Amino acid sequence: MTWDYGGVHVYPAIPARKLKGALGAYAPEVPPEAVLVLLDDTVFGGARNGLLVTRDALHAKPRFGQPTRLGIAQIRDIAPETEARMRVNGDIFYDAMAIDHAAMLTLAVRLSAVIQQRNQAQASAQASARQHRPAPPPRQPPPASEADILGVRPNASRNEIELAYQRRRSQYHPDRYQGEGEQALRWATVKMQELTQAYRTLIQRAG
């Protein structure tokens, strides 16, 4: 990244004195090597007012304002404004005093391009994740009750239970499925086990 404007300095060509002044004035927690762009908005070059761009945040200190930090992850959009101002997320983030309008315009446009690329990459990653998200397993029906298995009322009498069991037993007995294949025989065996268990449970309840 190259610049043709005074007051804007880009890593690794950021003057040490300016960097020290900016960090000391409004970003003391930032290590010097983390600064990518320094905008010196002072008349005499002390850089105590201006803008710092790091990999994870924008730091700003206007001449008559308090230091401001905005994380890159919080930024949705950046746009240039008139009279050397920069708008972030729809609000004026920095209003320069000594910096040329063209310099602020260029900085805003370049930062905007970075944010747009990040937003596009995030949107693409989210779309890809949705496409590859496994489908939820099909909802399993609730297990059948003993009365449903035998085909009787929940409060059926012992006689009703006996009759229903004999009827279903003759219908699903494995002997009826001899010669129809191993799968059919296994199915009939499972059904008979279900019927027998349901019968025993209902008979006990019926007293």
Image (tube, helix red, strand yellow):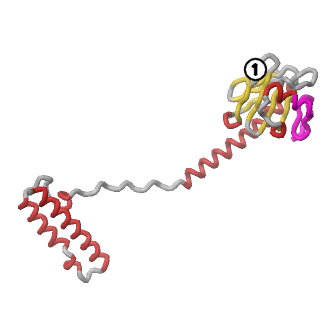
| Residue occupying image coordinates x 20% and y 61% | 149
User: Seen in the image, is 20 located left or right of residue 129?
Assistant: right
Residue 96, image quadrant: top right
| Residue occupying image coordinates x 71% and y 36% | 72
Q: Residue furthest bottom?
A: 179
Which secondary structure, mark 1?
loop
Q: Is residue 117 visible?
A: yes
- The answer to whether residue 8 is magenta is yes
On the image, the x and y values in percent for residue 57 come to 74, 34
On the image, the x and y values in percent for residue 157 come to 7, 57
Quadrant of the rendering where the C terminus is positioned: bottom left
Pointer 1: what residue? 66
On the image, the x and y values in percent for residue 54 come to 78, 37
Quadrant of the rendering where the N terminus is positioned: top right
Residue 22, image quadrant: top right
How many dots with numbers?
A: 1
Q: Magenta part mainly helix, strand or loop?
A: loop
Q: Residue furthest left?
A: 159
- The foreground one among 133 and 192 is 192
On the image, the x and y values in percent for residue 116 come to 71, 40
Residue 183 vertical position relative to residue 125 in the rendered view, above or below? below
Amino acid at circle 1: Gln
Q: Which residues are magenta?
A: 1-20
